[in-house]
Image (spheres, rainbow, N blue to C red):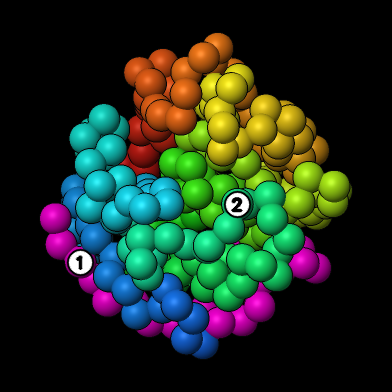
Amino acid sequence: MTDISRKALPDHSGSKNAADMTHVEQGPHQGQKVYTAGEPLENASSAMILVHGRGATAPSILELSGAFPIAGMIYLAPQAMGNTWYPFSFLAARHQNEPGISSGLAAIKDVIDRVVDAGIPLDRVVLAGFSQGACLASEYVARHPARYGGLLVFSGGLIGPQDAPLSFKGDLKMTPVFLGCSDTDFHIPLERVEESARVFEEMGALVTKKIYPGMGHTIIQDEVDEARRILNDLTRSQPV
């Protein structure tokens, strides 16, 4: 496991939503380490960006890469300042979670720009996250619509208050999206998972949503298996 520094690079994503993130020159998460595993970036043909949850670390979420052993893939995990991307619930008023949200989205963008600059196209880049990291990854994809290799949302959903409509524009061009969550997750209301799935479908993603009775706030084997199906499709489309 290694870490790489980050630098500002041009935006390689598609059209952005009007409610896009504020430009962050130096937010709380800028300048943090990005840990890597798998193929060296200069040799990689695909990439997975793993976003950790509240109170966790980049090295801890990077351990999930062992469940997805894909030849030629680099796994990258940005670290949040203080192990938390934003201070309050993802359902809180957005201003209460700034500058954390904008800075976290910028951290993801930094990693994606580095990967694309190294020659890996967006349709071979998979974003994955658990809990707070799943919310941030979801928000990034919705705000930066394009054809990605995939989005894996483990116990998370789009960010915003429950009384505010989720509205995004753009085409995800059949990006495969998996959302998995418990029906009784005390952090993630079932309604937000359902709403997030609907938004991604309306944006043109191929959505698989699975709700697990009594699962709790964790990742189970069936979710790993669903994620592997998306990654296996990516492997079958491996350039030669």
Given residues 131 and 42, the one toward you in this image is: 131
Instruction: Report which residue position mark 1 lands on.
Output: 3
Residue 12 placed where, x, y %?
55, 68
- Percent from the top left, x then y, of residue 39? 19, 51
Residue 131 vertical position relative to residue 83 in the rendered view, above or below: above
* Residue drawn at point x = 56 percent, y = 48 percent: 135
Circle 1 packing at 10 Å, graded few (<14), some (14-19), many (20+), is some
Determine whether the residue tagged by mark 2 lies in a helix, strand or loop: loop
At 76% from the left edge and 51% from the top edge, which residue is drawn? 161
Label 2: few (<14), some (14–19) or many (≥20) C-alpha neighbours in 10 Å: some
Image coords of residue 143 (percent x, y): 68, 59
Q: Residue at x 66, y 78 (%)?
A: 22
Compared across the picture, whether 109 is left or right of 170 comes to: left
Residue position for label 2: 89
Alpha carbon of mark 1 to alpha carbon of mark 2: how far?
29 Å
The number of callouts visible is: 2
Q: Amino acid at mark 1?
A: Asp
Residue 11 in magenta stretch: yes
Along the horizontal axis of the image, is 2 left or right of 119? left
Residue type (three-letter) at the residue carrying disc 2? Ser
Picture layout, residue 181 above or below residue 152 = above
Q: Which residues are magenta?
A: 1-24
Res. 120 in view: yes
